[in-house]
Image (tube, rainbow, N blue to C red):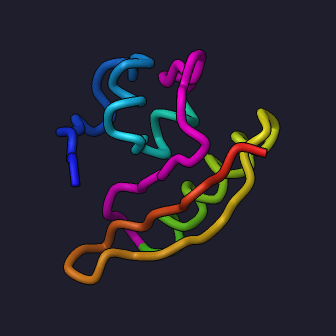
Amino acid sequence: MRVASIVLGMAPVTPQQLASSRLVIAESVLRNEVDFRGYPHRHLAVVTRPRMASSSITQLLEAVEYLSHFGWELVSVTSATDSRMLYAFLRLR
């Protein structure tokens, strides 16, 4: 499995970075720092940084809600066992 490094909350996410990693930080989505134009895949993962559990899920679902306006639908939400990272998996309708 190919994993791209992610710098949390830094520079805007280019279409090439997004296509390569298929993973985007929820905070970057909410700050409108992600260029989804030309995204070649049907599925996408959105991840939150570790923080208080309630604010992490809130931020994750805010990003999911925002993306739903652009044709993305939520498939699943899960957490990583070894960290407090939350992941939402979306599918383009």
Q: Quadrant of the C terminus?
A: top right
Q: Residue at x 70, y 44 (%)?
A: 92
**Most foreground residue, 51 or 37:** 37
Quadrant of the image occupied by residue 9: top left
Q: Can you give x and y, in whole percent of width and height, for residue 55 in the image?
A: 51, 64
**Most foreground residue, 36 or 1:** 1
Q: Quadrant of the N terminus?
A: bottom left
Residue 31 vertical position relative to residue 22 in the rendered view, above or below: above
Q: Residue at x 56, y 48 (%)?
A: 43
Residue 38 lies in the magenta-colored region: yes
Residue 46 vertical position relative to residue 79 in the rendered view, above or below: above
- Judge left or right: residue 9 versus residue 41: left
Q: Can you give x and y, in whole percent of width and height, for residue 71 in the image?
A: 79, 39
Q: Residue at x 34, y 56 (%)?
A: 49
Dominant SS of magenta comes to: loop
Query: Which span of residues is magenta-colored?
Result: 32-52
**Most foreground residue, 41 or 9:** 41
- Judge left or right: residue 58 versus residue 48: right
Q: Residue at x 21, y 47 (%)?
A: 2
Number of callouts? 0
Q: Can you give x and y, in whole percent of width and height, for residue 21 in the image?
A: 33, 39
